[in-house]
Image (cartoon, rainbow, N blue to C red):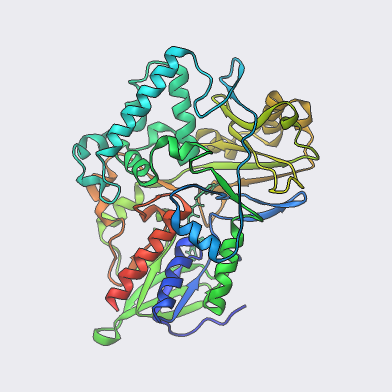
């Protein structure tokens, strides 16, 4: 284990993509940094593990068009990408029947299709009026922030169309539409290019994956930072200390304390709230952070000897409005050495997973069998990541804002508290909630600190 230094210029809390981005930018500007990471690995919500004969992502795994920082980083570190498998038919399971379809829009009746297009166009128009940087300053912000996405969705009459929106919201946020501020939802869509872009594979956020997994990027990047990264060092307390030219912070972790001029806390807001700040943060920040709740997603990867769903002309992609699995994908390794299916259990179903028996691997495999035949019941290996049960994430993919949070206390999301600055994908204004957003937030926090020191 690396020895903690007594003093650096900047301590960064968290070695996810936001923390690594901040550390790299500060280092490039000549600052001495220490990155303190609670887990015994880097990458945070990006986590790659061997399953069967290949390495698979149990956290973030896709990169899409417009994610320029991540694309540049990946290229620089020599991590190759490959397209998500899409050949063949997709399936829509509405509980009553399983229908095949091609293209981006699921198999619906003509009236339902028209209603879906209308709903998407309406959302695009509303999104265009909302600022991703400062949603509370958008026209009509107060009214939008009083509503939930579920209230907005009541305008949609078709039950199946509403159910599809539920699936999309569950997949993107890990919560039900009733839990989300409409204003925050629109700002999030704006930051990532719209609901369709966030939901789609081709031309969307799920377009490509990383050979050997996304954590390879974090591992190679952390190696460049060398002994500045300290693992198994959860930070518990940050105290302001000294005055004038000596003013700084003392960051206390389970592996000891480090003195620094500034700290960057690059972790999700609910985890940041657990770090004791001295003096205590302003009440408006405390209030905001209490309104940011982590979503819940269980990611299940099942490996097989053959990609039998491909033989049936299926792409492996399924949208299901009956639980527990809401979405499935072909997640085979790039060289098909290890065929695999990926299933997402999300939002309310993921929370039930935590408590109710019967929501288990067997239930997931039974659903895969309903779509792809009995072979699906017999995987060679299964890996399950229940992110809500991860103590250093508390959920995933992102912390979401409840109604009235942004317009009352939203300004404190990125506002430094004394000499403590905040990063993490939740604070991003481009691709909020994604790896790209984490990178943007880390770079922004590093610029703040450099201006200050
Ligand atoms: C299942 C899943 C699927 C996803 N899919 C995608 C995808 O396909 N594409 C995409 O772009 N994004 C995806 N995401 C989201 C993406 O992974 C995150 O947006 C991104 O990784 C967040 O990075 P971060 O640095 O902001 O936070 P994190 O990755 O959460 O990093 C924070 C780090 O801080 C550490 N930490 C926490 N508390 C402390 C403490 N007190 N002291 C020290 N260290 C601490 C944590 O261990 C962690 O390593 C997904 C996430 C999940 C979980």
Relative vertical location of residue 386 with respect to residue 148 in this rendering, above or below: below
Q: Nearer the viewer, residue 382 or 193?
A: 193
Q: Is residue 419 left or right of residue 436?
A: left
Q: Residue at x 35, y 32 (%)?
A: 149
Q: Residue at x 49, y 30 (%)?
A: 167
Q: Is residue 147 left or right of residue 366?
A: left
From the top left corner, tell me how far across and down residue 32 is, in percent.
43, 81
From the top left corner, tell me how far across and down residue 11 is, in percent.
42, 74
Q: Residue at x 60, y 59 (%)?
A: 215
Q: Is residue 334 left or right of residue 232?
A: right
From the top left corner, tell me how far across and down residue 236 is, in percent.
45, 68
User: Quarter of the image containing the C terminus?
Assistant: bottom left
Total label count?
A: 0
Q: Residue at x 47, y 26 (%)?
A: 164
User: Quarter of the image containing the N terminus?
Assistant: bottom right
Relative vertical location of residue 129 with respect to residue 449 in this rendering, above or below: above
Q: Nearer the viewer, residue 444 or 113?
A: 113
Tell me if I can see residue 278 in this picture: no
Relative vertical location of residue 91 with respect to residue 439 in this rendering, above or below: above
Q: Nearer the viewer, residue 222 or 206?
A: 206
Q: Nearer the viewer, residue 410 or 369?
A: 369
Tell me if I can see residue 419 in this picture: yes
From the top left corner, tell me how far across and down residue 344 is, in percent.
59, 37
The quarter of the picture where residue 438 lies is: bottom left
Q: Is residue 197 left or right of residue 354?
A: left
């Amino acid at each position: 284990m690396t020895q903690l230094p007594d003093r650096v210029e900047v301590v960064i809390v968290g070695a996810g993509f936001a923390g690594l981005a901040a550390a790299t930018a500060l280092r490039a500007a000549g600052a001495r940094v220490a990155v303190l990471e609670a887990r015994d690995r880097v990458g945070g919500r990006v986590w790659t593990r061997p399953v069967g004969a290949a390495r698979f992502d149990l956290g973030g795994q896709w990169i899409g068009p417009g994610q320029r920082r991540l694309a540049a980083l990946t290229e620089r570190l020599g991590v190759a990408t490959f397209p998500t498998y899409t050949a063949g038919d997709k399936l829509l399971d509405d509980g009553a029947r399983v229908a095949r379809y091609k293209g981006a829009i699921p198999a619906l009746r003509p009236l339902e299709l028209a209603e879906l297009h209308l709903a998407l166009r309406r959302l695009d128009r509303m999104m265009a009026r909302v600022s991703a940087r400062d949603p509370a300053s958008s026209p009509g912000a107060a009214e939008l922030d009083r509503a939930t996405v579920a209230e907005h969705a009541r305008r949609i009459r078709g039950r199946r169309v509403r159910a599809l929106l539920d699936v999309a919201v569950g997949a993107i946020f890990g919560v039900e539409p009733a839990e989300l501020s409409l204003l925050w939802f629109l700002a999030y869509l704006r930051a990532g290019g719209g609901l369709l872009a966030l939901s789609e594979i081709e031309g969307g956020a799920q377009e490509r994956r990383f050979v050997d997994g996304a954590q390879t990027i974090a591992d190679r990047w952390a190696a460049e930072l060398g002994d500045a990264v300290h693992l198994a060092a959860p930070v518990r307390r940050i105290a302001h200390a000294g005055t004038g030219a000596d003013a700084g912070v003392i960051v206390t972790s389970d592996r000891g304390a480090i003195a620094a001029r500034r700290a960057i806390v690059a972790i999700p807001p609910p985890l940041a709230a657990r770090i004791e700040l001295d003096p205590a943060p302003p009440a408006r920040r405390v209030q905001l952070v209490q309104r940011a709740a982590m979503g819940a997603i269980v990611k299940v990867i099942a490996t097989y000897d053959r990609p039998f769903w491909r033989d049936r002309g299926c792409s492996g992609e399924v949208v299901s409005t009956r639980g527990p699995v809401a979405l499935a994908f072909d997640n085979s390794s790039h060289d098909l050495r290890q065929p695999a299916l990926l299933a997402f259990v999300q939002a309310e179903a993921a929370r039930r997973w935590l408590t109710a028996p019967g929501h288990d691997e067997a239930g997931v495999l039974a659903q895969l069998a309903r779509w792809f035949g009995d072979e699906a019941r017999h995987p060679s290996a299964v890996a399950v990541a229940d992110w809500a049960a991860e103590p250093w994430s508390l959920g995933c993919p992102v912390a979401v804002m409840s109604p009235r949070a942004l317009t009352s206390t939203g300004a404190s999301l990125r506002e430094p508290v004394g000499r403590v600055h905040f990063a993490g994908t939740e604070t991003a204004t481009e691709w909020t909630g994604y790896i790209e957003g984490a990178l943007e937030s880390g770079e922004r926090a590093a610029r703040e600190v450099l201006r200050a020191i």
